[in-house]
Amino acid sequence: MAVRQADVVLVGGGVMSATLGMMLRQLDPSLDIVMVERLDHVAHESTDGWNNAGTGHAGYCELNYTPETDDGDVAIERALNINAQFELSLQLWSYLVEQGILPEPNNFINQTPHQSFVWGEDSVKFLKRRWERLKEHHLFQEMEYTESFEKLEEWMPLVVQSRDHGQKVAATRIQHGADVDFGSLTRSMVKWLETQPNFELMLNSPVTYLDQLDNGSWALRVKNQKTGETTKLEANFVFLGAGGGALPLLQKSGIDEARGYGGFPVSGQWLVCQKPEIVKAHNSKVYGKAPIGAPPMSVPHLDTRIINGKPALLFGPFAGFTTRFLKQGSIFDLFGSVKANNLKPMLSVSKNNMDLTRYLIGEVFQSHK
């Protein structure tokens, strides 16, 4: 069997592989790049617009990025770093639009205010202190703060609808937040890459073998699920951007760094609303604050989304139970991932994170009501 030689193999057709492939192509057009995807099209798992909040994680509204310190202050360093990283993403996308590589920005990113909303005296004090600390930095200087119900009815009418006006509440808002359709973004990048020389996209082709050779390069085998044909690949660099499918591939690689990693049988679920009269009443991403002792993901958020050009509201995520690592994975994914070197770390997750364990159990047994 002939071996297909490549400089780079990108495993997975999501936003991470597409972004890396795009950056490598811009830096060195001579690189021979192969992208392999197990499904019949790219950006269909976690990258798809329906499978994430599309927030861009700019640090504007995610309160777990700015934890309260023991002395009552608020640590903002993580939010600053995350925001700076998102600014780099914006610069990359702007450059690609200018070069005609990506379509008009509104095809994948739209301005959407980012807001944080809290209630209770202690949480209000925290949010005000957070605002005071963040607005001193130029990246957050346009952040607004209010404790006024009248202003909140303007900012987030659906969130405060029927809420007790005697309750202590507060919110912050940054108008220039964004909603990102990572699915559309990824499909546009891969579509352009396919027009370039020295790039090959292999669909319906899961990786069945991955091992490092004596010379430091990597050997892979991929099997086309439609034709049954197996292709051998060799590359100096392999990137595992396969989302939930990365763990078994990492284990196949045999590298020491793979030891101790495991999966957890948790999924994320969303409530979706596409009724025009309701969608029009809310234009923002509103994030709350987790109660003391609860994990950060325990407070769902209400997100304006524009997916494939159509507006919607997503409320969530709620935790579910699944043994699949991918939406289109196998129910045996979890069991197949358990090895001698990761059994202890996986068991310790429940033991050392009881708050998280209780939260997940409660979420799993919730009804739709």
Image: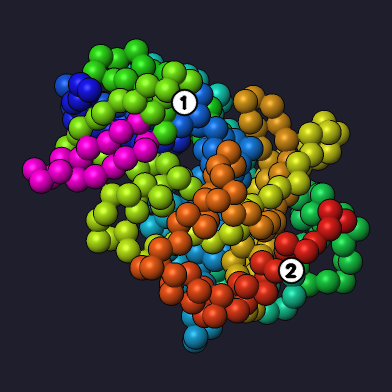
Q: Identify the disc placed on residue 362.
A: 2
Asked whether residue 173 appears in the rendered view, the answer is: no
* Residue drawn at point x = 61 percent, y = 45 percent: 53
Name the magenta segment's main secondary structure: strand
Q: Is residue 10 above or below residue 318?
A: above
Q: Is residue 330 left or right of residue 154?
A: left
Q: Earlier in the sequence, mark 1 or mark 2?
A: 1
User: Which of the 4 quarters of the picture holds residue 279?
Assistant: top right
Asked if marks 1 and 2 touch (Cβ < 8 Å), the reply is: no
**Residue 88: where, in percent of width, then height?**
36, 42
Determine if the magenta segment contains residue 100: no
Q: Nearer the viewer, mark 1 or mark 2?
A: 1
Q: Is residue 200 left or right of residue 354?
A: left
Chain part drawn in magenta: 207-222
Numbered disc 1: secondary structure? loop
**Residue 274: where, in percent of width, then height?**
79, 34
Q: Is residue 168 left or right of residue 182?
A: right
Quadrant of the drawing holding the N terminus: top left
* Residue drawn at point x = 25 percent, y = 56 percent: 255
* Residue drawn at point x = 55 percent, y = 32 percent: 44
Q: Is residue 11 above or below residue 161?
A: above
Numbered disc 2: secondary structure? helix
User: Which of the 4 quarters of the picture holds residue 46?
Assistant: top right
What's under tag 2, amino acid-wise?
Gly
What's under tag 1, amino acid-wise?
Gln
Determine if the magenta segment contains residue 218: yes
**Residue identified by numbered label 1:** 225
